[in-house]
Amino acid sequence: MKSNPTVARRRFLKTALAASGAAFCADAFPWNARKDRREARYYKKLAGDKVQCLLCPWCCIVLPGGRGQCGVRENVRGVYHTLVYGTASACHIDPIEKKPFFHFLPGRPAYSLATAGCNLECKFCQNWELARRSPEEVFRYGRALPPEEAVREAAGQDCPIIAYTYNEPVISLEYTIDIAALAKEKGIRNVVVSNGFIKKEPLRDLCECIDAYKVDLKAFTESYYEQIVGGSLAPVLDTLVYLKERGIWTEIVYLVVPTYNDGETEIRNMVEWVGKHLGPDVPVHFSRFYPQYKMKNLPPTPVPTLQKARQIGLDAGLHHVYLGNVPGHEGESTTCPACGRVVIARAGYLILENRLKSGKCGYCGNPVSGVWSAT
Ligand code: SF4
Ligand SMILES: [Zn+2]
């Protein structure tokens, strides 16, 4: 069953720390920014030992000794470094539905790992303990996890999927790509849970080794991205279009924040854009906001607002429009776009019934889009 994300987040941290043994002991991990760094990819050198990062659309210009806006990439005398390669702040096995992916190997466990930092600054961040703190703070609770070890652990725990999640995987892209490439060789799938705020060249490299990408589409206006998220909408839409071109399975989450991005016109513009540019089979999850971090002054999203958003999506012709963080709602289940019968019944993260047969509706035989088989 789904729960309040703040509570779930605390529980996750507690579990991760409690599961430590040698792995997550706060006292036992001597992470050190000098020792545990390596040269970054995706940057260019500028005059005067400055560098320009080319990983995300910020294109930060960083002075010697400085860090980029994400806080995890540092200029060391004219050479740009990533500080988050080979260190995990948390590892956990989650159902793939928790990411959420509803059309990607349903019911299968995902070995889920995180590093530190983020390139956006969402005022409602659910994972601010990881995303809004420095590597020095976050990795007090981390451990060394070389790519080979991550893949070995995932395989050893019978996880057919590795998920790069909890904080933004784009800013640790060198690490993400190295794990994903190794995992792919072993037949393990890779999924990215991301804000989609990434430049084209690194995205192209990432797409060589991943199987699915969940994009948090925060809103459908530049003003919201500027004021609430600290980013820009246009590059995220470019990412979505590129993923479509590359054939990477994509699902979209839209967190509906009361009075900020819940207007019917904005929702309609968004779903119409999705239908036109990505097609009707891309799942859109309208997720319920809970007050947290810097947005504690708002109430949770009223369920009728979410239902209305879902109806707008369905009316626009989208085939798979879900509700998130509303456990037990019919909007958690997958229906066949042809006959309208429920083909995957869910309650929270649980699959109650799966009536798909080889990716087709078990009632009428119509294909349902998704990645349904690990083989
Ligand atoms: S990844 Fe970090 S350092 Fe690079 S451009 Fe983005 S915010 Fe700046
Ligand atoms: Zn059917």
Image (tube, rainbow, N blue to C red):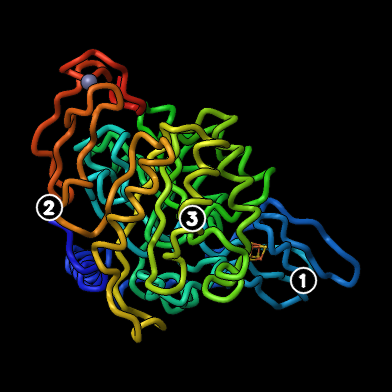
Residue 67 relative to residue 30: left or right = right
Residue 182 vertical position relative to residue 20 in the rendered view, above or below: above
**In terms of secondary structure, where does tag 1 sit?**
loop
Q: Dot 3 corresponds to which residue?
A: 217
Q: Name the amino acid type tagged 1.
A: Arg
Question: Contact, CB < 8 Å: mark 1 with mark 3?
Answer: no
- Residue 249 at x, y = what percent? 44, 33
How far, Cα to Cα, is label 2 from label 3?
Answer: 24 Å
Residue at the location (63% across, 72% down)?
69
Q: Which residue is mark 2?
A: 328
* Residue identifier under label 1: 77
Q: CA distance from mark 2 to mark 1?
A: 55 Å
Q: Amino acid at mark 3?
A: Leu
| Placement of 294 over or under 354, stated as above or below | below
The first of marks 2 and 1 along the sequence is 1
Q: Secondary structure at mark 2?
A: loop
Residue at the far top: name it: 365
Q: Quadrant of residue 282?
A: top left
Q: Report if the CB atoms under discs 2 and 3 are less than 8 Å apart.
A: no
Foreground mark, 2 or 1, reads 2
Q: Quadrant of residue 290?
A: bottom left
